[in-house]
Amino acid sequence: MAFLEISDVRKQFQQNVVVKGFNLGIERGEFVSLLGPSGCGKTTVLRMVAGFESPSAGRILIDGKDVTPLRPNQRNVGMVFQAYALFPNMTVADNVAFGLKVAKRSPSEIKSRVEEMLAMIKLPHLASRYPYQCSGGQQQRVALARALAHKPKVLLLDEPLSALDAKIRVSLREDIRALQRSLGITTIFVTHDQEEALSMSDRVVVMNEGRVDQVGAPFEIYNDPATRFVANFVGTLSVLKGKVLDAKAGRIQVGKSEIIASRKIINHNVGDACSVALRPEAAVLENGHDLGSGRNRLGGTIDEVSFLGSVVRIRVKIDDDAISLDTFNNPSAIPPQRGAPVVVSFTPHDVLVL
Ligand code: ADP
Ligand code: MG
C-alpha cells in the first residue's frame, strides 16, 4: 500500500458528479502533480484529501490510516492555496505560528519553530511584517512555512504559483521542489500549467472531467500520451489529416505523400481517417542537407516564424494543415523567411497516430 492512498473516490455536488472513480497511490516523499483544465476536479480531490470536503464514496488513507471520517486538523496535512490566504491582521511570524498556537504548543517551542521555518524559507528578516508589506512571492513562501510548521505528513498545494509574475513563478518552482526534497515530504501539487507539472513532478496525473486519463513520469506523459486528450493538453502538437493505408506496417497517406509511423496504430483500420500528430522538436527543416534514409518527408511553405529567444518556432504550411517545429536560434545564419519552400522531415518513431 502506498503512503497516501486515494481509493475509488467519488464526489457529487447535487446532481453533478465532479470526481468519478478516482484512484491514486502516492509513495512516501513523492511529488505528484494533478494536472488538468479548469473545472476538471483537481481542487475537489485536494480538498477531499485535506478533509474540507467529504467524498460521496471511497476512502482516503494516509500512512496506513483511514482518514476519511477525520476533520482537517486531525489528518496531519498542510495546505497552501492559490490566493494568498494569510491572515491579514497578523504578522508573518504570527501567521506561521498560528497552527502551533491552536495545537497549544509551548511558547518556547513555537518561538524556535517559527524561527526555524522563517530561516527555511529564507525570510527571517520579515518576521514582524504584515502580509500587505510582503510581495506575492514572499507571501506564498510564508504560506508554505505556515503549512509546514506543524510537520505534516502530507503537503497539499493548490495552484500556489498561479497568481505570481512569470519570473517569480519559475524561481519559486525550483525553491518549492528543493524544499520538498530536503524535507522528504509527500506532496500533491495542483496546477493547470503543464510546464509547471512537467518540470516539478516525480509523476503527473492528468485529469479530464473528474477522471484520471494518465499517470506517469513527466517524460512518459509527454512522449507517450495515453489518450488524445493528454496528447493535446500536454505540450504543443501539430496535427495533420491522414488516412490509414496499412495499420500493421504503419503506412499513412498525408495529402499526396505517404509516411510511416513505427508506433503501434491502435483502433484504426485500413481506409480510416486518422490524425497524424508531431511534437515541435520532432520535426526538422531539411534544407538541402539530406538527413539519411528512413525518415518521413513532407514538402511545404514557411507560414510563420516566431522568435522565442534561444528557440525559433517555425510553422510550415502543408496542404491545408501545418507543422510547427522548433529550431535553435543561430545568430550567424540567415533567419528563416516566410513563404520559402521547405522540406520537413521526421522519423517514423516521432509520429503519434491519434
Ligand atoms: P478545478 O480545481 O480542476 O478547476 P474544481 O474541483 O474546483 O475544479 O471543480 C470541479 C467542478 O466541481 C466544477 O464544475 C465546479 O463548479 C464544481 N464544484 C466545485 N465545488 C463545488 C461546490 N462546493 N458545490 C457545487 N459545485 C462545485
Ligand atoms: Mg482549482
Image (cartoon, rainbow, N blue to C red):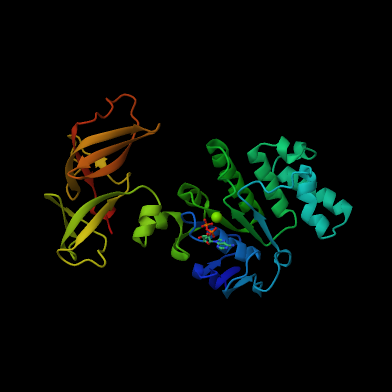
Residue situated furthest front in the rendering: 14
Q: In which quarter of the image is the N terminus?
A: bottom right
The residue depicted at 33 percent of the width and 29 percent of the height is: 330
Residue at 34 percent of width and 59 percent of height: 228
73 relative position to 19: left or right: right
Give me the residue at 57% from left, 65% from top.
27
Q: Position of residue 296 (x, y in %)?
A: 19, 49
Counting labels gives: 0
Residue 132 location (% of width, % of height): 71, 38
Asked which quadrant contains residue 156, the reply is bottom right
**Can you tell me which quadrant of the image ligand 2 is in?**
bottom right
Q: Horizontal and vertical percent for residue 40?
A: 48, 60
In this picture, is 275 found above or below 344?
A: below
Taking depth in this image into account, of 56 and 165 the one nearest to the observer is 56
**Image point (18%, 46%), residue name:** 297
Residue 307 left/right relative to 245: right
Front position in the image: 349 or 10? 10
